[in-house]
Image: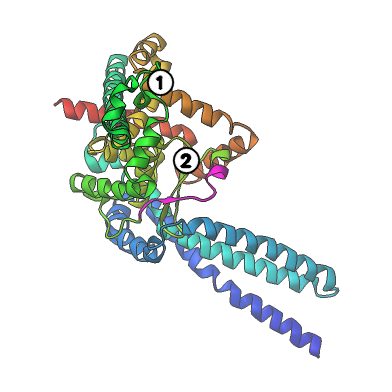
Amino acid sequence: MERQRSEGRARQFGLKRLWFVVPGVAALALTWAAAANPGLTEVWYSRGVYPWLSSAWGFLPSLASWSVAQWVVVGFLVFCIGFVAVYAVKLVRGRGERGLVLWRALATLLAVASVGYTIFALMCGLNYYRHTFAEDAGFELRESTTEELAALCTTLADEMNEARAEVATAVDEGDSAADTAATGEAGEGSGGADAGGGMPEGDSAAAPDDYATAHGGFEAYAEAAVGNMEALAETYPALSRPLYSRPKPVLFSELMSYADIAGMYFPFTVESNINTDGPFFTIPATMGHELAHQCGFMREDEANFIGYLACKDAADPLTRYSGYSLAYDYALSALIRADRDAAVAVNDTLSDAVRADRQARAEYLKQFEGPVAEASNAANNAYLKANQQQDGTRSYGRMVDLLLAEARQEAR
């Protein structure tokens, strides 16, 4: 009799947990409806419910200066390890009741998966089926000539060179001011800044990092990234939202580098998480990219383009440099495939300082090449395809079409 009561309680416990499957089924139905009706998804969800719902959900995490997401991930991993350990012990000890143990384990897994999928769908998943940013902004995407692509690359190279020169000038002026303050007039007889020979300090690959440190570091640029996105939303209202959660630095950034991840939007806390381990000149554009996801644009090519737009008109030269660098990477890759000689000619116009930065970035990334990065990219590819980006990671290359469309629009 006691055993029957125990089995009844176990089944009842499992059935109670199965109630958590209901939200998941409802979220799946919403996903199917969103995929079938992009127009309604755009109006009612992406521009209606999502900005307010995600702002409310992400309000408490937004108050923290550190990434809440990283600790949610750690907590989830601990839960998974504990779950496996507990139910493994119960299976070993539960002779005659192993079926009930498996039933409870399955019910728990279904409940967790259902709740997780529901949050994912509401905090970002449905946005995969909204109108594209190009449709929203009125950009005309069409085939372009190699000459147009080469002209785009040339313009981006010129803008990069100019912004990088401003960074170098600011660093040199800052160093000169510091030297003057430290040594006074006595420094006049020291031979000057170039007495040691070689490139001026402002032209070294460390200059962007030095500049960023002198201008407030990560926190200042995170605040500026929000301001840049708010300014961009005045031109493109689809980017408007009640609350922009500041980009957050990730404590485990080196692990992100091994996984070849520069940044990650985490829908469960509505946070834009940034890998801070690499060269700083890449970070402002990454912040813009992840904030674009926060604004509801989940397609990677569009998030890159929005990140570039948020950077290009900034007052800060390092932010502009970051945005132009991101755009140049994709545009040059496309030009290499179309006309390698033209690409080499454009790349030869880069300043020594820009070349030094790009070389430093390449050397940094090279040390993390390996099976972990390959597995991460494969998982990301599968995730993108599962969310209607049928080209997988190749969809990043479609940013070039948006860059060309913008160039045509500005030329009118």
Say if residue 164 shows up in the picture.
no
Q: Earlier in the sequence, mark 1 or mark 2?
A: 2
- Tell me the crowding category of disc 1: few under 14, some 14 to 19, or many 20 or more residues within 10 angstroms, Cα based: some
Measuring from the top left, give residue 406's x and y in whole percent.
24, 31
**Dot 2: what SS?**
loop
- Which residue is tagged 1? 355
Q: Quadrant of residue 96?
A: bottom right
Q: Are marks 1 and 2 in contact (CB under 8 Å)?
A: no
User: Is 383 placed above or below 6 here?
Assistant: above
- Which residue is tagged 2? 262
What's the residue at 47%, 62% (across, down)? 118
User: Is 325 placed above or below 270 here?
Assistant: above
- Location of the N terminus (image quadrant): bottom right
**Label drawn at residue 54:** none
Please report the bounds of the magenta region as a residue range.
Answer: 246-256
> Is residue 42 part of the magenta span, yes or no?
no
Along the line of sight, the residue nearer the viewer: 359 or 131: 359
- Location of the C terminus (image quadrant): top left
Measuring from the top left, give residue 322's x and y in whole percent.
34, 34
- Tell me the crowding category of disc 2: few under 14, some 14 to 19, or many 20 or more residues within 10 angstroms, Cα based: some
> Is residue 247 part of the magenta span, yes or no?
yes
* In this rendering, position of residue 244 left or right of residue 95: left
Q: Quadrant of residue 370?
A: top right
